[in-house]
Amino acid sequence: MKLFFEPQSAALLGATGNKFRPGYQLFKNMEASLAERFYPVNPNLQEIEGKKCYSSVLELPETPDVAVIFIPANAVPQAIEQCAQKGVKAVIIESAGFEEVGEEGRELADRCLHIASRNQMRLWGANCMGMINVHQQKILSFMNSNWRDRLTAGKVALVVQSGMLSAGFLMHIMSRTPFGLSKVCSIGNKMDVDEVDFLEYFVSDPETQVIAMYLESMKRGRKFFELAKSTSKPLVVLKSGRTEFGAHAARSHTAALAQDDKVLDSAFRQARIIRVYGMEEMMEVARCLAVSPGKVVPEARVAVITFSGGAGVVCSDELHDRGMRLAPLKPETLARLKTVFPEWMDPGNPVDVYPAIEKNGPVKVFSESLDALMQDENVDAVFMHIFAIPTREDMFQYEKLAEMVAKYQKPLVAWMIGHGETAVKVSQLLEKHGIAVVNEISKGIRIISALTMRR
């Protein structure tokens, strides 16, 4: 797997100088990633933009760590045979036209696997978008090369069975709050390399702390769940094909076979995998797990700081639905909260701070209230509600917030509504300092649930 994710040399079979074809984006990405140890292969071209092009992988001056194949499906078995003759051990097939198209495609896949097994070669794909190693800036994918500078190195590994869905995730991530990624991979039909191989790699990868996966099928379920249970790294999984209709769509997409969802759901719980049911939810949970500390508790006791009594009531219901509850605050915590509250108001949980803010301002109230709640032994996590107003970004002592999170090691999640531009700026500042921010109460509760079930 290191040959796939950390190659020092690579070949591209199907390189093209046609700027309107995906093979050109592959060429540009791989050239930028590997420089002189990148070898384009196309029997019809002598060079591409001044870069020497080889007629066959057999002519390359060295055996590359990985070969990327992006040619018509019926030509792929011969290309793999030549890679085998050259001694290549890792091949990514980004071409479509295999199991997902029926019997003819399955026969092509069988031929590829036969060649690979005879030559101790691993095949990634087919029908996929390849790999991005963000920390090393290596891109073996036909994603648009203009995205390169917008990728942020971080702790989350993203595994997506669909090729274009991974591209959509990337575009979504890079157009919103900065999202730190370690690796991104599209795994396609899983002709050979499957989710177990990826999970094994990411469990031991020092650059990855959170693993998020979108899967349409699971080829080796028992091994997958054993691995998930053995690691301390949070694993977030969106498993599609839960219904008869979804399973049918998955078969036509990546030839995925359906599995009994009730059985899978029980296995997810036993392995302590964080199961999600939507793409947005998967990304939100993974993002927040990467920036906020976790605390494992059987029934999380949550303190809620809110600007609205109504929001506090909604929050209480959602906590109950998720198997959590409002924390019973200690007398000394209530006494400390009272020091920033109006004389006529006694604090409780949810902690409605709006009258206190009217009296003492947001900086003092949030600082004192958060510190008091984080110190409380009865509080396992804090959910903070924020109303953003125009031109008011100085509601917090951000460095002090970061110190609190580091000191008390309790999840602190924020829900923010209000003025759009201010909300974006405050969200970025909070996340920069280790506080996850969401745009819906239900998402925040889901995040806290995930954070408090971490191993």
Image (cartoon, grey):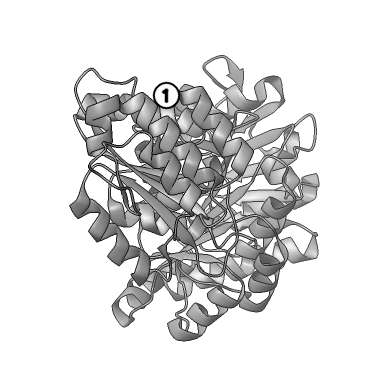
Looking at the rendering, which quadrant does residue 56 occupy? top right
Task: Return the residue found at the far top.
Answer: 50
Image position, residue 363 (x, y; %):
36, 25
Looking at the rendering, which quadrant does residue 424 occupy? top left
Q: What is the tally of numbered marks visible in this picture?
A: 1
Residue drawn at x 57%, y 14% is 50
Residue drawn at x 61%, y 58% is 77
What is the crowding at mark 1: few (fewer than 14 residues within 10 Å), some, or many (at least 20)?
A: few
Q: Nearer the viewer, residue 95 or 175?
A: 175
* Element type at mark 1: helix
Q: Nearer the viewer, residue 153 or 373?
A: 373
Image position, residue 11 (x, y; %):
66, 36
Task: Return the residue found at the far front.
Answer: 343
Residue drawn at x 80%, y 59% is 119
Residue drawn at x 23%, y 38% is 354
Image position, residue 291 (x, y; %):
53, 40
* 260 in relation to 296, above or below: below
Q: Nearer the viewer, residue 44 or 9?
A: 9
Q: Which residue is mark 1?
A: 146
Q: Is residue 453 visible?
A: yes
Q: Is residue 42 visible?
A: no
Decide if residue 157 is on the left or right side of residue 314. Answer: right
Image position, residue 184 (x, y; %):
54, 44
Looking at the rendering, which quadrant does residue 349 occupy? bottom left
Name the amino acid type tagged 1: Asn
Which quadrant would the C terminus be assigned to in this image? bottom right
* 164 in relation to 223, above or below: above
